[in-house]
Image (cartoon, rainbow, N blue to C red):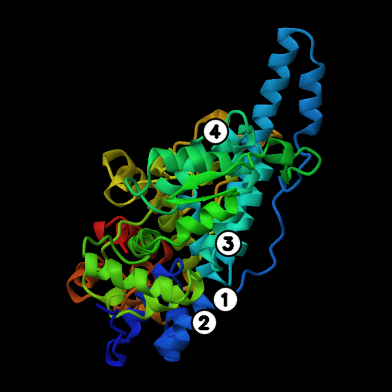
Amino acid sequence: MLLSPLALNRWDFDAAAHLLVRAGFGGRAEEIEKLHALGPAKAISSLVDSQPESFAPPACADPHSQDELRNQLREAVTPEQKQSVRKLLNEQFRYEMSDLTRWWVTRMVNTRAPFVEKMTLFWHGHFATSGQKVRHAYKLWRQNELLRQHGLGNFADLTKAISRDPAMMIWLDTVQSKRERPNENFAREVMELFTLGEGNYTESDVKEAARAFTGYRIDKDNQSFRFAPAQFDSGLKSFMEKTGSWNGDQIIDMIVDRPQCARFIAGKIWKFFAYETSDGKLVDALASELRNVQYDIRPFMKQVFSAQEFYGTEALNSQIKSPVQFFVQAFRTMPIALPESSVIVFAFRQMGQVPFYPPSVKGWDGGKSWINTSTLAFRYKLARQLVEGIDPLEIGLPKPLAMDMSGIRPATTPALLVDEIITASDRQQPENVVEKLFVRIFQCSSKFELATSFREFLSNRSLPLGDATIRELAALMMTTPYYQVT
């Protein structure tokens, strides 16, 4: 089976909108129209060939941000002194992680290269690494930048870079791995979670690979990778039926060379960007495309987004929005002000996806796991507050978390700026108001059945329609089940 290219007569406004949502986080009607006018090939290239722009780093982008407090901890004598310093370290870490999260959200909302950020988000879940164990915001920021810089390059090169990433080295313990006592955690997960999937390697492969990843250390001066030759096991290793003095990079090359790796990665990418499939022939076709481009992700993604299957009925509105997609898409498509860091982190926690804090080494399950009674109720509450203005305490943010390190309470964000969407003329024509909000909120041309109920909602309202009524309609749209999917 080969992937079927999208027929030109299937390329319409809704297809362009679907591409913009899945390859990014959606956009305004004029952005969709512009993408549609390009035609499929140029539209796909405009997204996939985009480059990450220069973006000011977060406050935590300092390898020595914890040095002063860590020195105080070493110098502390009494248990009380140690406890006091640890409390300050935890507060600083919490503040830096909150700031880092807002930094990335701001980047996702404002970027001119949304596909780069969407791909970074994909790899963030794939190479899941948590601040719960890493405990250093700088290292997690550096990993985020690594995913952004290498995420559209060669997959083998990306995996090698991740193996030497200090946050990953702490997360999966290679930083502790010694020639005399190899740690198997990274060696196991690089095969089970990152490249091959469970059941496609042996326990002997894990043990031998672990020996190849010894000697990986972190330079304390700049928190970067360094290699310690004295701690590296340079002896012969038998890995996947090949014997040699393999190092970590060579192990990764041998893994990527196996056909199962292409099936695993291609299938996971398709699930994230298109839909989950059990069609073995489709996965084989995707894997073949990935091998044909020698694991270069950018040309592979062009094939994915050019496939008719990507725009088919199985793909359209088949995904429950992740909390990050839900949140970022709202700000990219609507004139809404971004709230402060503590509010953003709280909202993600309530919806079940806090960036930089995956629940396990497997990342987030996604799909139906995003929705339960609690998370759905919060989504509806958040949607209304996004439109009406987020009050940190009204949305449920605990008072201790409603203060930053200076003790200042986050401000209420402004309400939806109606005049940026709706003209004075539109206010006299409810049909126009429904149409404009529908495209912004649902990212498609208005569906007759769904739009009818919104027209009825406005049918007995006095004209011209006021801001309060229009915001009420926007909130109503955003609290429908249809808004939870993409």
- Residue of label 1: 50
- The quadrant in which the N terminus is found is bottom left
Residue that appears at 37% across and 67% down: 441
User: Viewer-proximal residue, 45 or 480?
Assistant: 45
Label 1 – label 3 distance at C-alpha: 20 Å
Residue that appears at 45% across and 84% down: 43
Question: In the rendered structure, are the residues bearing label 2 and label 1 in contact, judged by CB atoms less than 8 Å apart?
Answer: yes
Question: In the rendered structure, are the residues bearing label 2 and label 4 in contact, judged by CB atoms less than 8 Å apart?
Answer: no
- Residue of label 3: 157
- Element type at mark 1: loop
Question: In the rendered structure, are the residues bearing label 1 and label 3 in contact, judged by CB atoms less than 8 Å apart?
Answer: no
Q: Considering only vertical position in the picture, is 259 above or below 404?
A: below
Q: Considering only vertical position in the picture, is 57 above or below 354?
A: below
- Residue of label 2: 46
Q: Position of residue 382 (x, y in %)?
A: 40, 49
Query: Which badge, 4 or 1, comes first in the chain's sequence?
Result: 1
The residue type indicated by label 3 comes to: Asp
- Element type at mark 2: helix
Q: Nearer the viewer, mark 2 or mark 4?
A: 4
Residue 183, numbered circle:
4
- Element type at mark 4: loop
Query: Which badge, 2 or 3, comes first in the chain's sequence?
Result: 2
- The quadrant in which the C terminus is found is bottom left
Task: Count neighbours of disc 1 (C-alpha within 10 A) and say few if under 14, some if 14 to 19, many if 20 or more.
Answer: some
The answer to whether residue 394 is visible is no
User: Which quadrant of the figure has residue 72?
Assistant: top right
User: Viewer-proximal residue, 134 or 398?
Assistant: 134
The residue type indicated by label 2 comes to: Ser
Query: Which badge, 4 or 3, comes first in the chain's sequence?
Result: 3
Query: Which badge, 2 or 4, comes first in the chain's sequence?
Result: 2
